[in-house]
Amino acid sequence: MTDTNKLLERRRQIKKRKPFFRKKDHYKTKGLEKRWRRPRGVDNKQRLRRRAHALRPGTGFKSPALVKGLHRSGLKPVLISSINQLNNITKEQGIMLSSKLGNRKRALILLEIKKRGFALLNLDAEKTIVKIQASVKERQEAKKKELLATKEDKEKDKKKGIEEAVKKEKAPEKEKEKAIEQEEGKDKEALTDEEKKKLEKEEKDKLLTKKV
């Protein structure tokens, strides 16, 4: 074993016996279970390091200085958020992709990492690429469905507009026909009145001729 491997093994052993430091009265509220805050009270028993009280961080739990900040693989983690930053990475460093990256940039960076053969510490390259491709396909299918739905709605609106325009064009013709029918009805009524008057005159003439 080399010196770095020995130091890494020592750090693992230290971390195994290292407790999880909790804030004073952490059991009273859920939000304090996974937080550490230095005790500041004058009579705080945790600050005074009394027995039967939660432990505080100390120098004994510290990892060796040569190995401090290294990944469990022995590589120094470097946060990356663009392809240009890959040019400065050495073999002693491992890549950690930023969580702020979008799917498109992330996929491009992962492909470049696979080509160059760098170590990726916080992701599995193949699985993430497959997930990104699946999500892209789902988005494309959803967009296609939305476009089809919008096209159908537009076609329906066009049909409705055409029908309404046809109805508007036919409406004056119907009104004209109704007006003509009304005029014809009035003429018929007028003719009948005239005929009635003629009949009345004829009857009067007959009566006058009889009297003479």
Image: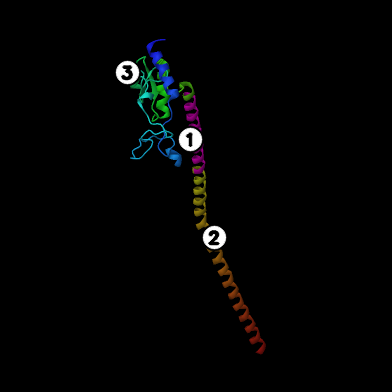
Q: Dot 2, crowdedness within 10 Å: few (<14), some or many (≥20)?
A: few
Front residue of 194 and 170: 170
Residue 62 spot, x, y in % from top left: 37, 23
Q: Say which quarter of the image contains residue 194.
A: bottom right
For the residues carrying marks 2 and 3, which lies nearer the camera in this image? 3
Badge 1 or badge 3: first in the primary sequence = 3
Image quadrant in which the C terminus is located: bottom right
Asked if the magenta segment contains residue 40, the reply would be: no
- Outermost residue on the front side: it is 51
| Residue shown at 54% from the left, 60% from the top | 177
119 left or right of 197 in image: left
Image quadrant in which the N terminus is located: top left
Q: Amino acid at mark 1?
A: Lys
Q: How much space separates mark 2 and mark 3, taking CA atoms?
A: 88 Å
- Which residue is identified by label 3? 88
Q: How much space separates mark 1 and mark 3, taking CA atoms?
A: 39 Å
Residue 72 spot, x, y in % from top left: 42, 19
- Which residue is identified by label 2? 177
Callout 3: helix, strand or loop?
Answer: helix
Q: How much space separates mark 2 and mark 1, taking CA atoms?
A: 51 Å
Q: Amino acid at mark 2?
A: Glu
- Which residue is identified by label 1? 143
Secondary structure mostly seen in the magenta stretch: helix
Q: Is residue 120 visible?
A: no
For the residues carrying marks 1 and 3, which lies nearer the camera in this image? 3
Residue 166 spot, x, y in % from top left: 51, 51
